[in-house]
Image: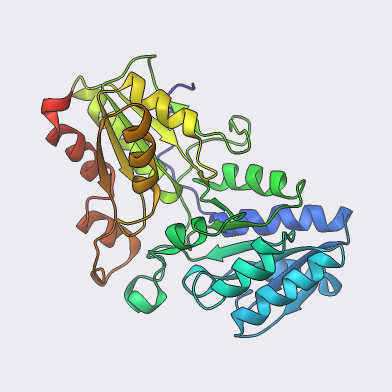
Amino acid sequence: MRKLPELNAAGNKIPNRQAICETLMEAAGRDRNVVALCSDSRGSASMTPFFEAFPEQSIEVGIAEQNLVGISAGLAKCGKKPYAFSPACFLSTRSYEQAKIDCAYSDTNVKLIGISGGVSYGALGMSHHSAQDIAAMSAIPNMRVYLPSDRHQTRKLIEALLEDEKCAYVRVGRNPVEDIYSEDDCPFEMDRATILADSEEYDAAIIACGEMVRPAVEAAKLLKNDGIRAAVVDMYCVKPIDREAVLTAARRAKLIVTAEEHAPFGGLGSMVSQIAAAECPRRVINLALPDAPVVTGNSREVFETYGLNAAGIAAAVRGAEEFL
């Protein structure tokens, strides 16, 4: 368990996708087997510097997501370490069969990087939103699913993925995410959540992933002013989910609130509810996007509309007062 971090209000100007590029460039300089592939998306993926620095380790597939994943799988079978970049909305749908068969079923070392995940594309609407990818990719046997919460954790995750030979799906947003951790203090253990709390016992546990972790920490700070002790579980590892972290939260808290940039079905909330119901029953409130096309707006506006911000998360905890 870690103390709730003191959040820097200055703001981070580096999106998680840029942290991925920087980490892969460092690795590619040491290992020629590290290869990046894009589907006409190197700019959106912040991978232009990689393509310029390592042209012989870069492949532009074009707008052909199925080919992107299939080619990556073939390269992996030849001993390469491919990182396939494409908007999450397309990577998790158009190439779903290739992810299932060529990557997971065939046990190939392909890392699928879903960029501009969730509602990052804002006003482009439902066609460009990926609100089903956690459920879809988690349903594939042998496929791991990760949603890092800030640039520092993103770097740690990519460094860890470079050391293994199993396939994975990593979803990151388009915009910079406010820092939660720092370069010198970023706790990370592969497939283990980070529990952030100011005490061993708490009234509520907020379990969040990806861009929802920062507002979850902010919500815990707001609740503290109301005398409500809230812990935050940074569940970047959605699959394999850290079961013990969920049970720890369930045992120590009277209420669990999950927060995710995803549809209400089959995502983090569903997984947490399943674990808690089976082994340590607790009231679980799932904060998610609606089962409908979301309103038009940027990420901040969408989050505010559906209570996926600090105020909304804190209000959900306060609204369950009878369980505290």
Query: Hey, which quadrant is residue 119 in on the image?
Result: bottom left
Residue 7 visible somewhere in the drawing: no
Observer-nearest residue: 45 or 250? 250
Q: Residue at x 56, y 35 (%)?
A: 182
Q: Nearer the viewer, residue 190 or 106?
A: 106
The structure residue drawn at horizontal position 25% and vertical position 64%, both measured from the top left corner, is 291
User: Which residue is painted at 69% across and 82% down in the image?
Assistant: 61
* Residue 121, above or below 206: below
> Which residue is depicted at the point 79% across and 72% down?
74
Q: Is residue 270 left or right of residue 58?
A: left
In the rendering, at what x and y percent does residue 216 appear? 34, 39
Percent coordinates x, y for residue 211 in the rendering: 42, 50
Residue at the far bottom: name it. Answer: 63
Residue 6, x across and y down, in percent: 43, 28
Up the image or down, 255 lies above or below 237; here it is above
Farthest residue toward the top? 200
Placement of 316 over or under 131, stated as above or below: above
* Residue 278 locus on image (x, y percent): 36, 33
The reply to whether residue 277 is in sight is yes
Q: Quadrant of residue 73?
A: bottom right
Q: How many marks?
A: 0
Pick the quarter of the image with the C terminus: top left
Q: Is residue 189 above or below residue 209?
A: above
The colour scheme is: rainbow
